[in-house]
């Protein structure tokens, strides 16, 4: 398999495993999320190490080590992005598998098991037409104040949604134009979604316009903007005014 084929296959199989765990009826609530996270993580980590033994690996659900920092190629995975949504049997959760090379998210796949879809960096499609009134994705439980302020300024409609991957892929799928996040994330929350978004011709950056760099010693990533390219300059300018 190519790296892209491997990423897509791993994301799809992990998604299938998660649906089976949920359908088993053995778990509910937080225990379902924990069981799903750990089961999918075991599969993803063992599979990456078996298929790409010389590459580095970073997973939300595994203890991090300094070994990956010396690697040129590092796989970054999130077994369940949106554990709450997964546990509540919603569809707005995802599985992330990305390969970063020299810190750049070059290859990625995001599975949306609840929708039966895997979006890939190696098979980009044309972006659907944009809505006349921009739609901005925000957390369904804690919308960031910066996103609310920017949406108000540019006249955007707020669209609440679950996981980071689900929100990013909603822009790829043409369900929204802008995903602005300022509440703090980690590398595994955005590596695969950013790889897929960039491959589809979307803008992806920090909210100051700087590039997103992965495989850092500190995996915390404070903010993120994924949007249609025609909105990037306006949104970045409005965010800049908020912090001025």
Image (cartoon, helix red, strand yellow):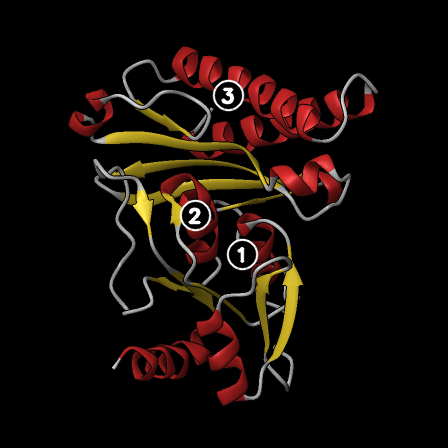
**Image coordinates for residue 70, horizontal then vertical, percent:** 15, 26
In this image, 85 relative to 3: left or right? right
State how far apart marks 1 and 2 are (Cα).
8 Å
Looking at the image, which residue is at 41% across and 79% down?
A: 235
Which is nearer the eye, 43 or 152? Answer: 152
Res. 228 in view: no
Circle 2 residue: 190
Mark 2 and 3 residues: CB-CB less than 8 Å, in contact? no
In this image, 71 relative to 157: left or right? left
Number of the label disc, if any, that sits on residue 44: 3
* Circle 1 SS class: helix
**Image coordinates for residue 82, horizontal then vertical, percent:** 60, 42
Mark 1 and 2 residues: CB-CB less than 8 Å, in contact? yes
The relative height of residue 42 versus residue 232 in the rendered view (above or below) is above
* Circle 3 SS class: helix
Which is nearer the eye, 77 or 138? Answer: 138
The relative height of residue 163 versus residue 68 in the rendered view (above or below) is below
Circle 1 residue: 168
**Image coordinates for residue 162, horizontal then vertical, percent:** 63, 52
The numbered mark, 1 or 3, whose residue comes first in the sequence reads 3
The numbered mark, 1 or 2, whose residue comes first in the sequence reads 1
Number of the label disc, if any, that sits on residue 225: none
Looking at the image, which residue is at 29% across and 54% down?
A: 212
* Circle 2 SS class: helix
**Image coordinates for residue 227, horizontal then vertical, percent:** 47, 68
The relative height of residue 152 versus residue 236 in the rendered view (above or below) is below
Crowding near pointer 3: few (<14 within 10 Å), some, many (20+)? Answer: many
Mark 1 and 3 residues: CB-CB less than 8 Å, in contact? no
Looking at the image, which residue is at 56% across and 19% down?
A: 38
The relative height of residue 10 versus residue 54 in the rendered view (above or below) is below
Which is nearer the eye, 193 or 122? Answer: 193
């Amino acid at each position: 398999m190519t790296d892209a084929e491997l990423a897509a296959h791993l994301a799809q199989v992990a998604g299938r495993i998660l649906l089976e765990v949920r359908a088993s009826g053995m778990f509910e609530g937080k225990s379902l999320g924990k069981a799903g996270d750990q089961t999918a993580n075991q599969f993803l980590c063992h599979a990456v190490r078996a298929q790409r033994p010389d590459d580095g690996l970073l997973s939300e659900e595994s203890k991090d080590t300094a070994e990956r920092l010396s690697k040129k190629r590092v796989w970054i995975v999130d077994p369940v992005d949106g554990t709450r949504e997964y546990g509540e049997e919603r569809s707005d959760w995802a599985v992330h598998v990305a390969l970063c090379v020299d810190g750049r998210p070059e290859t990625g796949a995001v599975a949306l098991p609840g929708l039966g879809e895997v979006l890939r960096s190696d098979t980009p499609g044309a972006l659907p037409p944009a809505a006349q009134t921009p739609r901005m994705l925000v957390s369904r439980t804690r919308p960031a104040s910066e996103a609310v302020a920017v949406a108000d300024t540019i006249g955007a409609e707020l669209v609440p949604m679950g996981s980071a991957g689900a929100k990013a892929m909603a822009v790829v799928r043409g369900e929204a134009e802008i995903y602005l996040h300022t509440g703090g994330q980690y590398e595994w929350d955005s590596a695969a979604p950013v790889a897929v978004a960039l491959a589809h011709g979307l803008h992806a950056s920090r909210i100051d316009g700087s590039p997103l760099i992965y495989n850092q010693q500190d995996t915390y990533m404070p903010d993120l903007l994924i949007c249609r390219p025609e909105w990037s300059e306006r949104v970045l300018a409005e965010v800049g005014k908020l912090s001025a």
